[in-house]
């Protein structure tokens, strides 16, 4: 099975900071990668699919890039509502749709 | 508006059984592949089960295969997860989610239902 490794697992940042989260796949997955945001007590919310396509309604400060094995999620200017946990997921060999272990973004 | 509403979660003893439901509305349910995803307390997301739109194709994660069964009733716009031989490791919030086969992504999620396995 393909494994996804996110880094860092935790990051502390301030409002206005540029934040980058990486997701590395154990083998090539083309662009079959999605990013989700999850706030405490809530369901995950789709942010980006196909590695770089922004889901409708998601603010443009979120962006995704990468293909093959290395991917990034970037928040260009962190806002108070962006403090959450972020997960990557691949579906190139669906099912299963393996998730990364998550990156928690907290307020510095 | 797409809505997915899970129900059926509760406290159950080890070795017990439970059936979760997911009521869907706002889209053509029979046309969508569906999944169950779970999240243990303080942990990450784990894909559990998949079912095709017709119900003819089913997959389960290794961790639940032989104990859990996914099913659907397209006439009732409902998805189910029958869970047997429950153990403490099955304690989690269980989410149902649609699979968008055009974008290769889980695009809509329910709010989740909590299953607690404890004596």
Image (cartoon, coloured by chain):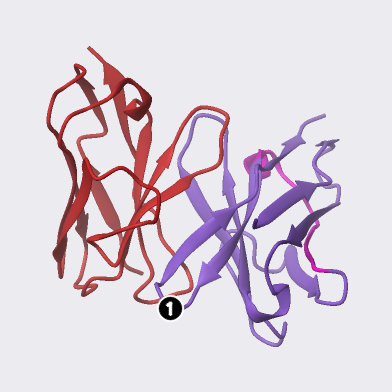
Chain colours: A red, B purple
Q: Residue at x 74, y 63 (%)?
A: B67
Tell which residue pokes out farthest to the top in this image. A108
| Image spot of residue B8 (x, y percent) | 84, 46
Residue identifier under label 1: B102
Quadrant (top left/top right/bottom left/bottom right) for the C terminus of chain B: top right
| Image spot of residue A37 (x, y percent) | 40, 41
Residue A101 in view in this figure? no
Front position in the image: A1 or A96? A96
* In the image, residue B46 above or below residue B33: above
Q: Residue at x 31, y 67 (%)?
A: A2
* Residue B84 lies in the magenta-colored region: yes
Q: Quadrant of residue A69?
A: bottom left
Q: Secondary structure at mark 1?
A: loop
Front position in the image: B105 or A7? B105
Residue A14 placement, left or right of B51: left
* In the image, residue B79 above or below residue B31: above
Front position in the image: B46 or A107? A107
Residue B110 placement, left or right of A30: right
Residue B47 in view in this figure? yes
Q: Quadrant of residue B71?
A: bottom right
Q: Residue at x 21, y 18 (%)?
A: A15
Q: Residue at x 13, y 24 (%)?
A: A17
| Image spot of residue B103 (x, y percent) | 39, 72
* Residue B37 lies in the magenta-colored region: no
Which region of the structure is painted magenta?
A: B77-92
- Which chain does tag 1 point to? B
């Amino acid at each position: 099975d393909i494994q996804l490794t996110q880094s860092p697992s935790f990051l502390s940042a301030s409002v206005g900071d540029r934040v980058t989260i990486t997701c590395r796949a154990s083998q090539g997955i083309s662009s079959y990668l999605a990013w989700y945001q999850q706030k405490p007590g809530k369901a995950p919310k789709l942010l980006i699919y196909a590695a770089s396509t922004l889901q409708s309604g998601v603010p443009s400060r979120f962006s995704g890039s990468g293909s093959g094995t290395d991917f990034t999620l970037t928040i260009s200017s962190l806002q108070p509502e962006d403090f959450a946990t972020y997960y990557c997921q691949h579906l190139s060999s669906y099912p299963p749709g393996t998730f990364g272990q998550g990156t928690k973004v907290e307020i510095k | 508006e797409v809505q997915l509403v899970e129900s059926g979660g509760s406290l159950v003893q080890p070795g017990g059984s439970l059936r979760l439901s997911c009521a869907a509305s706002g889209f053509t349910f029979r046309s969508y592949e569906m999944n169950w995803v779970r999240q243990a307390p303080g942990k990450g997301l784990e894909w559990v089960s998949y079912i095709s739109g017709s119900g003819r194709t089913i997959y389960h994660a290794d961790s639940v295969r032989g104990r859990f069964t996914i099913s659907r009733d397209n006439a009732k716009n409902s998805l189910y997860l029958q869970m047997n031989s429950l153990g403490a490791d099955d304690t989690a919030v269980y989410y149902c989610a649609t699979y968008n086969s055009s974008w290769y992504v889980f695009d809509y999620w329910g709010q989740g239902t909590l299953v607690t396995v404890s004596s």
